Amino acid sequence: MANFVFPFEEGSAEESDLLGGKGANLAEMTGMGFPVPPGFTITTKACNETSRREGLFPEGLMNEVHEAITVLEKKTGKVFGDSENPLLVSVRSGAKISMPGMMDTVLNLGMNDAAEKGLAKKTGNPRFAADSHRRFVQMFSDVVLGVNHHKFEKTIQKKKESASVVEDTDLSAEDLHSLAQEFKRIAEQETGKPFPDDAHLQLEAAIGAVFNSWDSNRAKKYREINGIPDSLGTAVNIQTMVFGNAGNSSGTGVAFTRDPSTGEKIFFGDFLMNAQGEDVVAGIRTPREISELEKESPQAYKELITLQEKLENHFCDMQDIEFTIEDGKLFLLQTRSGKRTATAAVRIAVEMVEEGLLTKEKAIMRLDPNALDTLLHPSLDPKAQKNIITVGIAASPGAASGKIVFSADDAVEWVSKGEKVILVRHETSPEDIHGMHVSEGILTACGGKASHAAVVARGMGKPCVSGAAQVVVNAKAKKFMVGETTLSEGDVITIDGGTGEVIVGSVPTVPAHLSKYFETILDWANDIRRLQVRANADTPADAENARKFGAEGIGLCRTEHMFFSDERIHLVRRMILASSLEERIRALESLLPYQRSDFEEIFTVMNGLPVTVRLLDPPLHEFLPKKDSEIKELAGGLGLSFEAVKDRVQHLTEVNPMLGHRGCRLLITYPEILEMQTRAILEAAISAMEKGVKVLPEIMLPLVGVSDELRFCREIIEKKAEKVFAEKGKKIEYQVGTMIELPRACAAAEKIADYADFFSFGTNDLTQMTFGFSRDDVGQFLPEYIKLGLLSADPFETVDAGVEELIKIGVERGRRNKKNLKISVCGEHGGDPESIDFFDNQEFTVVSCSPFRVPIARLAAAQAVIKKKNT
């Protein structure tokens, strides 16, 4: 066909860039001979062109659409806009990357008063015709005309009350017909224009609304959260309507080929009889388990079981399938790779390898390393007391506590003030995306496991309890009730998305347990990856976590973090405030046993693995009090005058301490600090070695920018080492290296390598120094930079292209001097998958990150190798 419109028969799953994921998969299923209602796709190219033309369709688009409608009329034997045998269609979005609930859909389009009569006559079912009519007017008014959907819901509720019925399905044909007319009046009152009856005008307006929804606030936020490019655009799928609301032998549902929460290989989902799709996903009615469909429509269920297995085997992935049954006949409306929890993703990947559907490498590439973070965090302590007030549907696993809020906007506001919140809603909608993103978890009174709240929460890795029917939400009054219990905004609750429990108060948690599937994936990753993965750890407890998660050593042990306990900070302050060298040395000698003990404990935990100890880095004033009351207390404890201590604090305070007297500059000015720390490290290593521990210490100098700085410090370290070895009568192998965290250090790396056994890029400071950003203040403007597209990502999360160039220079020049120079990274970027890909390409030796990011780094390092292999 021409440029912008493709019938389902002409596409394939490989064309998702042009047809969007939904359109490409509908074309694929059509080609496989599956029962897909006929239709066509308007391409993403048309969406982007419309956006470029500021809302004007590209020339010729609607001509192509009208031609495609004519083809549909011939296929179905129905006529679009006809009063006797009307063709009704759905108009649905479909981007390349699935964005559940973020963009718009219109069902039953082509409906008007005459079409309702014709449909009623042809089907002999006036109730079904009237129901389809009122659904169309309600959805079109909301999606296309922008009329608040609550106005229609209130009208429906009044109609049910006047008819003395509880469910929408209990309303009569007359009730539904009158609702359609009332809805039209509401739409005209709100817009100032008559509701459009012409089917072709309806279609053109609906296509425009779907295109516009690509740029809605909720869609933009979803793309921002999930890293989806704005440039993709959305396709529009026009498909012949099939009717799940045609009576009790009809129905609709959403099903998954495996459990999207656990990954278990069971057919999973929800359905409703005598309903349309939005009833299931919007939580309007509480759906039924998919297994019950076998009793309601055995033939359709049998066919669905067969088709879901074929779809999973064809796409080699867990599928999310939308289906409709019309008078007992099954139709498939969509299939896509299903959103799943991290737990499910790992299990599915492993079991699909075992089933022969995937190779190990493909299984590893299927996983999002960042999503696995959710597996590494605590769950509710099974021994804790729990005041359970109700149990809903376990929609997304995990557990969270927080203060209750009742709107997405309130969630954002409370979180900005440092609060943790649980978002409580009757049901969520796409407009809630920003609040869901910042909340600890979501609780809804309605909906099932395929509801908006459940699907979005699973994608975000947040706990969710949905369908908690006993929860009566009064959002206006900012409270909800469960029986006689009333909870208000700001009250603390806990939800368990794995059990569906809703609990009053905060419940303690226990550490996460890694499943056998997770261990299997990481074992496969270990066989593939080239990079070593170490952890940043400052305490024995951190070191134990690092080993538990598979760290191959410690890449950054920050010694200053050992100084802040009560008994030590006093000694540090005494050392800083010393009036003579002798007094300072006495204070350092008092600190020595503490440092030595800490190092020995860490060496013992990391038995057989290297430990990189970074020497003192921060400026001295950071250890001193700021308030006069604290200065006065310190002066009294040290036997000094308030004025003397305050003068010293003011003297040490710098205008820009990040560029000031810190790192190796401090150690050069006060070499006695360097000597004490060297002694502590080596004496601890020897002591641990004497107890049978294999110790591999690495001493690292911070903030080196000049090669002679490293030379000067290394000479002191080596001199002190020889003295310690002579005193102890034993030697131990150790290495001396440097942080590379200054642009000058990158430029001077060849000379610096003369005195370095290893380089470790401190990408936090290197980013800060390169940009001239202060990490403490960048939050005031960096989000706006990203929003405006001035930066593609936060450079403190993912290595910036400019910083990458400096790193390349540092690596090349360092290895020009020493071909096998060990090179690592120990900034936050060491746990960022995208950055790890860069480090692997630059042939780094080691990445180091926080203990809980170690499994993520292990997986990302394997993915980097696979990407390079497939390039």
Image: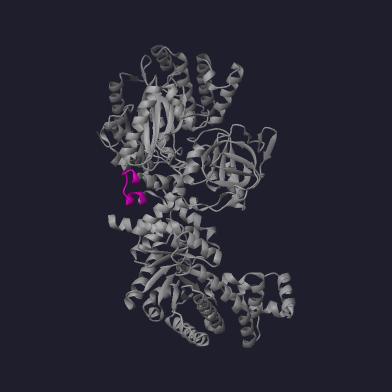
- Residue 371 versus residue 65 in the image, above or below: below
Left or right, 30 with reference to 243: left
- x, y percent for residue 65: 31, 30
Tell me if residue 361 is in the magenta stretch.
yes
- x, y percent for residue 127: 47, 15
Task: Say if residue 194 shows up in the picture.
Answer: no
Q: Tell me where the magenta segment starts and ends, as one range.
A: 353-364
- x, y percent for residue 248: 45, 18
Query: Which quadrant is home to the N terminus?
Result: top left
Task: Say if residue 75 shows up in the picture.
Answer: yes
The type of colouring in the image is: one colour
- Residue 275 versus residue 235 in the image, above or below: above
- Residue 164 versus residue 400 in the image, above or below: above
- x, y percent for residue 477: 67, 36
- Residue closer to the observer: 829 or 547: 547
- Residue closer to the observer: 43 or 556: 556
Question: Can you name the residue that lies furthest to the left here?
Answer: 1
